[in-house]
Image: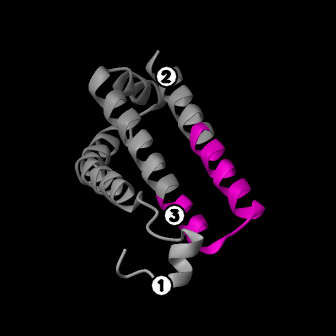
Amino acid sequence: MAFLTDRKRAAGLGSAKTGTEQFWKMIRSSIALQVMIPLFVITFGIGLGGTYEEVLAYYSRPLPAIIVGLSLIVCVSHFTAEAVEAVEDYVHGLAGKLAIIGLGALQYVLIGVGLFALIRMAL
């Protein structure tokens, strides 16, 4: 509290107390991306260039389907967290709140559509 000005002490504008949690969340997802992206590129590269039936047969196996599904979830979640940070920094008021709600909805739509497409290919 020694670093707060009198005005901030009176208005209660001190630390938000959530920065560390968000930082570690982003670090964890970054580490997961460092593992998942090479696996996804290798998996995608192996399946690339085959006929339609060969690609369906390849992605109906468990390992490629799991790698693609996990990569999709981690990438979209990481992107959404970064986009929410940008909105929190630069957009204020009702527009910021609506943008954050929209980003959350977009995240679930992208993950849902991607997993639906993957399940359709795998089954």
* The magenta segment: 82-108
Query: Whole-percent x and y of residue 39?
Result: 25, 44
Residue that carries the numbered disc 3 in the rendered image: 85
Quick one: 42 or 74, which is closer to the camera? 74
Quick one: 79 or 115, which is closer to the camera? 79
Residue 55 position (above or below residue 98)? above
- Mark 1 → mark 2, Cα distance in angstroms: 56 Å
**Which is more N-terminal, label 1 or label 3?**
1
- Mark 3 → mark 1, Cα distance in angstroms: 26 Å
Q: Amino acid at mark 1?
A: Thr
Q: Are marks 1 and 2 in contact (CB under 8 Å)?
A: no
Query: Whole-percent x and y of residue 25?
Result: 34, 51
Q: Amino acid at mark 2?
A: Ile
**Which is more N-terminal, label 3 or label 2?**
3
Residue that carries the numbered disc 1 in the rendered image: 5
Tell me where residue 20 sits by quadrant.
Answer: bottom left
Residue 118 position (above or below residue 44)? above
Q: Amino acid at mark 3?
A: Glu
The residue that appears at 30% across and 51% down in the rendered structure is 33
The residue that appears at 29% across and 40% down in the rendered structure is 43
The residue that appears at 43% across and 80% down in the rendered structure is 4
Principal secondary structure, stretch drawn in magenta: helix
Query: Which marked residue is nearer to the observer: mark 3 or mark 1?
Result: 1
83 relative position to 60: left or right = right
Residue that carries the numbered disc 2 in the rendered image: 119
